[in-house]
Amino acid sequence: MYTGNPDVPDDVFADVLTQVTTFVRDRVVPRETEIMNSDAIPADLRAQAADMGLFGYAIPQEWGGLGLDLVQDVELAMQLGYTSLALRSMFGTNNGIAGQVLVGFGTDEQKARWLPGIASGEVVASFALTEPGAGSDPAGLKTVARADGEGWVIDGSKRFITNATDANLFVVFARLDPAPATGNGIAVLLVPAETSGVEVGVKDAKMGQEGSRTADVTFTGVRVGAEALVGGAGEVGYRAAMTSLARGRIHVAALAVGTAQRAQDESVSYAASSTQGGTPIGSFQLVQAMLADQATGVMAGRALVRETARAYVTGEDRRIGPSVAKLFCTEMVGKVADLAVQVHGGTGYMREVPVERIYRDVRLLRLYEGTSEIQRLIIGGGLVRGAQARS
């Protein structure tokens, strides 16, 4: 049973959520076109986000973060999803797939070295998993960390790495050579960005999410010490990364709900005010049907992410539920965004109209942190294995 977060009581969290909601609606939403056209988050918005603690909202308070648990995280994410997803991307890896590896499984020394800076935003952490031949399934990883004395030498290339151009720390997946006696041989290592042999490519030009930064990263003869191995053991680091990804899937699902809510709000507002032949288009039943489908998806998604987050925090379900939430909500927001463009008609196809940007932005949600196809394999395989275990 979920009894609340003792470190952040409900009344304190309510204040945090109100502040973030106000920041998103009053400060960021009016500047979405600026973010899109400049392909960057303005420095003053970054500074405000850091001052509010957004770079470390999911980092424990002992390391300088706000200490929100996942139940609170999804409420925050639904507000952050209401505006340009690039804003959340700026601090998403610090709180999510990179930061949580250290929070859950880092050694005391690793936590002390990195988490305070991650929580404050002085350190930007990037999660370096994807490669040209390996993404949702890390089994195809080619990056190798070879034992060298007391440390490791890393060689390999990573692709589509979020915040790579701004990163101070890379959380890197690699195959250990020699492989450890236990586990699958894939480990996670901490590599400071200034380490010799680390090369970051040019910023990727993407379909959407302007303002977020991804790039290729190459590791050539990169030497790190024994202290770089997350948790001090190969199998520990890999398990930490998989746990972090599962948690991140619920967060992405909540983002999708927030963006779907924005698309619905834009649609309802347009339908109520735009006219055809002197009649508001919202009076037409077929338009009402599209709005109804949007609302149904948003409400179902919101309930799903809240329940999935609760089950994750209590330990009831940390594998199938996260994949269910990510699959449903990211597919749902794609449909809601498509309907939003349809409700707007030709106007919805015009650049600088919010639903046009949303339509492009949300397409990525079905790809990163495990594609929809991978989520289906996790869900279906997990259900079958569960039945077999009970028989």
Image: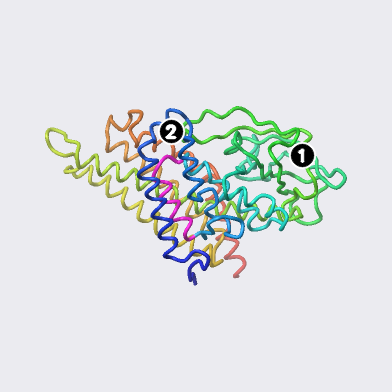
- Does the magenta segment cover residue 352? no
Q: Is residue 339 left or right of residue 369?
A: left
Vertical comparison of 231 with 289: above or below: below
Q: Residue 12 occupies which quadrant of the picture?
A: bottom left
Q: Which sits in the foreground, 317 or 94?
A: 94
Question: Which residue is most to the right?
Answer: 149
Tell me what residue is drawn at x 62 percent, y 35 percent.
159
Q: What colour-coding does the image apply?
A: rainbow
Q: Residue 386 occupies which quadrant of the picture?
A: bottom right
- Does the magenta segment cover residue 73? yes
- Front: mark 2 or 1: 2
Which SS type dominates the magenta stretch? helix
Residue 310 position, x and y percent, is 48, 64
Residue 96 position, x and y percent, is 56, 50
Tell me what residue is drawn at x 39 percent, y 59 percent.
303
Q: Amino acid at mark 1?
A: Ile
Q: Amino acid at mark 2?
A: Ile
Question: Which residue is most to the left?
Answer: 278
- Nearer-N-terminus badge (2/1): 2
Q: Which sits in the foreground, 300 or 204?
A: 204
What label does residue 367 carry, if any? none
What label does residue 35 carry, if any? 2
Element on which disc 2 rests: helix
Quadrant of image for the C terminus: bottom right
User: Which residues are the magenta region?
Assistant: 71-85
Tell me what residue is drawn at x 44 percent, y 37 percent.
361
Vertical comparison of 330 with 7: above or below: above
Neighbor class of circle 1 (other Cα within 10 Å; few <14, some 14-19, many 20+) is: many
Tell me what residue is drawn at x 52 percent, y 60 percent.
69
Q: Which residue is mark 1?
A: 154
